[in-house]
Image (spheres, helix red, strand yellow):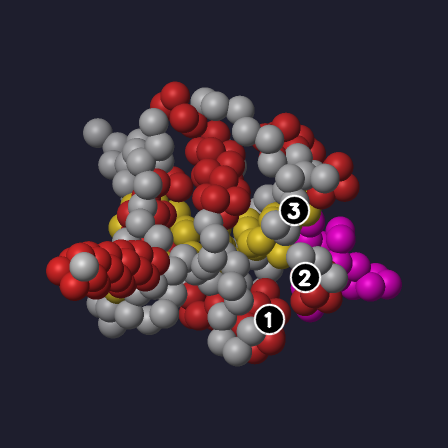
Amino acid sequence: MKNLCVKFAAVSCVLFLFSLAGCSKSEKQIINSEGALDIQPKETSQKESQTTKTWNNSDGVICVLLGYGFNDKTFDEETFTNLSNEFGLEQNGGLICPLVYPDDFKKGNSARISELYYMINEKNIKGILLLGAPENTNSVLARIQDDWNGKPPYPVFSLFPQDDVLGMEATCDFVLDYERSAKEDVLNEETTQSIDENIEKILINSVRYIAELPAALPLDKDLSTHVQQIVGEDKKVRRFTDSETGLQSMNHFVIEKVQKK
């Protein structure tokens, strides 16, 4: 009987140690050194990507804001129709909360991007996707960050912004631009956004990524891989390099221009 008790105690001890090891391993996989979710880039097969999935806003909505360069009425209607078909609109129980600047931000005769703060506060937010963010959008995002003691728990992606670059980098998970020529970079010239079929794919991929993420993207070595997956394999993405300092940004990326032969 004594031996049986000893054996039982030994087995219990081993099982307890295994359970601790399992918990430690699980926690290590989920939480990184900064206390953020350790989200590994995932491979999606062609079969999986073609599978129809029904989305709803039980976990929150994704605010998609179309700003400068992307607020043409024809483009807006086509974009939100495509997003509605894919993810559904908030008004119908779907994921997407559509916003267009300046039309949805007018107070009297002027439009104020600051209204975005109040719009966000009225909703259960799963993520924010900015396309052509107007000037001072980063100030709104900074105010939202303050409400969350530094960083909101949901993703914020900025695609082809017209706002201050450093401000965007400081308030978004990542910033994505088209590569600028050396002349445009040195002279700080504004580039005209060209809307092509790649924009729609990046937009759809961005929304799908936000929909699948349980939290904001951590600023780590995998960030460039996430951005590359969002852009797609047919376009090469690299980190933005400041032409004056030669320093690379941690979360600002550019889509490389295709060299003409």
CB atoms at circles 2 and 1 under 8 Å apart? Answer: yes
Q: Position of residue 196 (x, y in %)?
A: 48, 32
Q: Residue 150, relative to residue 24: is it above or below?
A: below
Q: Quick one: quadrant of the C terminus? A: top left
In which quarter of the view is residue 42 placed?
top left
Mark 2 → mark 1, Cα distance in angstroms: 9 Å
Q: Give the position of the N terminus as an image quadrant.
A: bottom left
Q: In the image as oriented, which residue stretches furthest toward the right?
A: 108
* Dot 3 crowding, Cα within 10 Å, few <14, some 14–19, many 20+: few
Q: Amino acid at mark 2?
A: Ile
Q: Nearer the viewer, residue 55 or 72?
A: 55
- Quarter of the image for residue 228 reads top left
Q: Residue furthest front?
A: 1
Label 1 or label 3, whichever lies nearer to me, is: 3
Which residue is located at x 71 percent, y 43 percent? 90
* Highlighted range, magenta: 99-115
Give the residue pinned by disc 2.
120
- Closer to us: 218 or 29: 29
Report the disc number at residue 144.
1
Which residue shows up at 42% across the image and 66% down it? 169
Q: Is residue 126 left or right of residue 7?
A: right
Rounded to the nearest angstrom, the CA distance separating label 1 from label 3 is: 22 Å
Residue 86 shows up from this direction: yes
Q: Please name the residue that numbered disc 3 is placed on.
A: 58
Q: Which amino acid does the dot numbered 3 rest on? A: Ser
* Marked residue nearer the N-terminal end (2 or 3): 3
Residue 108 included in the magenta stretch of the image: yes
Vertical order, 193 against 55 (above or below): below
Q: Say which amino acid is labelled 1.
A: Ile
Residue 68, compared with residue 194, is above or below; it is: below
Q: Report the disc number at residue 4.
A: none
Q: Nearer the viewer, residue 34 or 233?
A: 34
